[in-house]
Amino acid sequence: MATIDYPQQAKESFLAGIVALALTVPMMGLRTASGQDGMIIDIRMGDAALTALGVAVGHFVISLIRQALQQRSPKETKTEKSARLKSIAIWIGWASFAFALTLPFTLNLTEGLGLHNKTRYYLDIGILVLTYVMLGWGLNIVVGLAGLLDLGYVAFYAVGAYSYALIAAHFGWSFWVCLPLAGLFAAFFGVILGFPVLRLRGDYLAIVTLGFGEIVRVVLLNWYQFTGGPDGLSRIPRPDFFGLPFKRSSSEGETFHQFFGLDYSSIHRIIFLYYLIFILALITNAFTLRIRKLPVGRAWEALREDEIACRSLGLNPTNTKLTAFAIGAMFGGFAGAFFATRQGFISPESFTFIESAVILAIVVLGGMGSQIGVVIAAAVLIGGTEMFRGLEEFRMLAFGMAMLAIMVWKPRGLLANREPTVTLNGDKEAKP
Amino acid sequence: MSEPLLTVEHLTMRFGGLIAVNDVSFVAGKRRITSIIGPNGAGKTTVFNCLTGFYKPSVGRLVLAGADREHYLERMDDFRIGQIAGVARTFQNIRLFPAMSVLENLLVAQHNKLMRASGWSVLGLFGVPSYRRAEDAAVELGRYWLEKINLIDRADEPAGDLPYGDQRRLEIARAMCTEPQILCLDEPAAGLNPRETADLNGLLRFIRDDSGVGVLLIEHDMSMVMEISDHIVVLDYGQKIAEGDPEAVRSNPDVIRAYLGDDEENDDIDAETAGDSQ
Amino acid sequence: MEYFVQQLINGLALGSIYGLIAIGYTMVYGIIGMINFAHGDIFMVGAFGALIVIVGLGAVGFGGAGVLIILALLAAMLIAAVYGWALERVAYRPLRGSFRLAALISAIGMSIFLQNFVQLSQGARVKPLQPMVEGGFVVMEKGNFAVTLSYLQIIIVVTTVVLMAGFSLLIAKTPIGRAQRACEQDMKMASLLGLDVNRTISLTFVMGAALAAVAGMMFLLYYGVIDFFIGFLVGIKAFTAAVLGGIGSLPGAMLGGLLIGLIETFWSGYFTVEYKDVAAFSILVLVLIFRPTGLLGRPEVEKV
């Protein structure tokens, strides 16, 4: 085993630190701030120097770890590693399923035992994470399966939310009618958006979809008469339990707690919402697993691998791409409708490019095409940063850094491992 | 001469001022192996790209005698040529689906058939038995070809993991799974050693005799071309300079002249053909 | 008529700024075939760099407006160059062999990081600057509408023209420019011939960053206010300009920039201001649909 060249490494890290210093001194060291007569420069060289030092040290440590890992001879073959990852993934999959399924009860129990008093808070985080899981699974169809770079997924999220809000407000139909309609609307939007641009290559498609996302946001922001502009839409009908509203009492009939003989608690609605998004997400997942084994799902993956080969095999690439785009949009629309009914209020601020970037990050970091990877990535990125809300400022900073770090370390994502959809010699099961 | 399968009439391809293919006409017969040869830059791949829809010919007609009717390839989109006319091709740089398994590659080739059987995947979503039967049949076809190309043991491995020679054969098997009328192979022997080339020859003969599919191939490996071709078309600088069976082409002075300047290759041809003569 | 001319002048000035940024996009795309997603944020860094120097030196009463501007320009270019260099080393070079989406994601990550880094370092509030260059000519008058051509606008356009000329010369005549063009055409061959490809790529990023910094300072002087988020929108518009002009073409980038600037100005002048950003995106979509190679670009033929 070769030894690590510490002096060389130290020199490289030192240089990294110098570069970091060159970056931090102007930005961090010389801060523009408001003084009495205008702007002044607040000199904070300490911050800059400390950060640069941190970079140097971090560089040193990470490089050492990397070299140590590289020199360890691989003890397993590729198939062994594949199998190991697969079993890890399956284990994580079932564990997180069980965890998510029982979360409300677990929280209730632990609260009853006096371990905390934040059931509602944790449930809200759970709902948030599950929403992003669903969005991640939806985008996974477009990016992970079909290989289409969509940087404007938030547009479908927004279309779903706004169409749900408007339909529910104007027609007064129940949630169960409005949700599918919102999804269909989003899918339709996906076809319209997709049709002109899906023949564009990788990077261009990314920028164009980004542009679309922004166009949708700007239109929502300015079309006051229709969308409420920056004020958004409020008083969105809350969901009910198949006709039983989640209210203390209602002039129109029984309410939820009355029907089931429970004391009224605002947590009922939250738990209902939680299971609602849970089921919606599971439907998305089930759909994806199923569609991979069908011709259109395989066509998506083949298209991602090599479009020219697909054409030579008689596949119509435009139709195939449009289907992926539209179906991905549909699930985004469902998620948007859920978002609208959960919040009761929506505004264009919730639908910025950052959302698209976050969802894309979840898909890519988790491992494109890997369903479990999306769950883990969402739990870490969303759940993790929610829990540390105190460090809100550093959240996005860490987020950006994480995207970069994971791409450099594992470009295929954390859990990238593809199981064939049908096997000749093995069992006919596809991994989640 | 057998029935014409593909009739190329006055094919011309211009790129701006450059004429890559100039008034080329030939016929590829059914149940025949037809080879297109010629020095580098003669326009062979351009002809292929016109046939398979990647270029639109400037002039000319490309008539494919399909199962029930004729197809005019010069007017069709590239994927429709595969879908409707039954033209399958392989590529100079192998284009498999590397992350998908060997078997899955063969299933993608049967996409259109499976789409119909699954009601554009919608019925398949609900597990309709007719789709399951269709998928099983598709897997069987895949198994059939995997046995022919000796890759049945590696059916579930990612196609990208296969060695080069296996990948080449897989690409051919995948093309055959589209159940085509004609199989177009772009330099199938490139990079293969003599043993692999012999296997390839056997495979191509099998395809011609057993499936009844016409084979059209571009090749530089002269021994292979002379060995398995029923019919040879020779191009040089975009024009056809000879056409006929291997004997005729071999001794054609124009062909020899076209390859002149490549004395080594000529000597190889002479040596090999001398050794081949029975 | 007068209104039209005023919009024309304004549009050209704005377009020059876009053009300078667009050059950076087109150069990077030309050489490594990837969109530098964080380029807009380099522009923002350049603007901040200029602001810091102006405020800093101005506070100690260093010199007159002219001196301050020149120093700020140089400082901004230097700072942005370092950031550009670091960006390439950290986010692009490690992923050069990997698939395109990986580089795009890491660039997006860097963009987010840069924005938040500046936000944290400099504060989230907008940063105003007193106008430093005031006054101009009155080109024509009708009634009480005077078409003005401000000194600042002249400076912007002249600087841009000079930089463009200098740059084109650099690319066409110098060894650096030749190396860059060689790498654009065939990177493998260039490296086999002994060209230091890494250095050439780094230099490309650095040059693009420097130009973006100039644009950043112009932006600062022209609009008088900047914040950490300006990179995003301006970046997309500049990229649109690069695509419109033909990605990979330097004169195309400038032409595209001017066109986008004019379109945006005329749109907000004659229609509505709110949707002017939408106008730029829509142009992008239309261009990519109908003429993906742009106005001056070379068509790419994919070898089958």
Image (cartoon, rainbow, N blue to C red):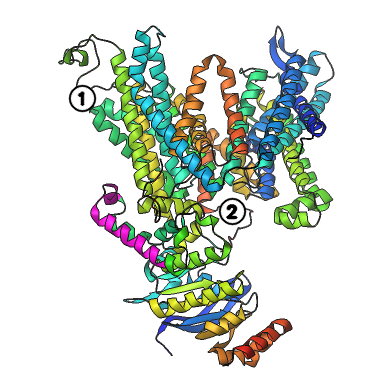
Q: Nearer the viewer, residue A402 or C172?
A: A402
Q: Secondary structure at mark 1?
A: loop
Q: Is residue C252 above or below residue B3?
A: above
Q: Nearer the viewer, mark 1 or mark 2?
A: 1
Residue A211 % position (x, y): 51, 39
- What numbered label is drawn on residue A242? 1
Residue A340 sits in which quadrant?
Answer: top left
Q: Secondary structure at mark 2?
A: loop
Residue B213 % position (x, y): 41, 77
Q: Give, as a three-letter code, the residue at label 2.
A: Thr
Residue A224 in sight: yes
Number of callouts: 2
Residue B81 in sight: no
Q: Main secondary structure of the magenta part?
A: helix
Q: Nearer the viewer, residue C64 or A328?
A: A328
* Labels 1 and 2 within one chain: no
Magenta range is B122-145
- A227 left or right of A15 in image: left
Residue A169 % position (x, y): 28, 25
Q: Give, as a three-letter code, the residue at label 1.
A: Phe
| Residue assigned mark 2 | C293
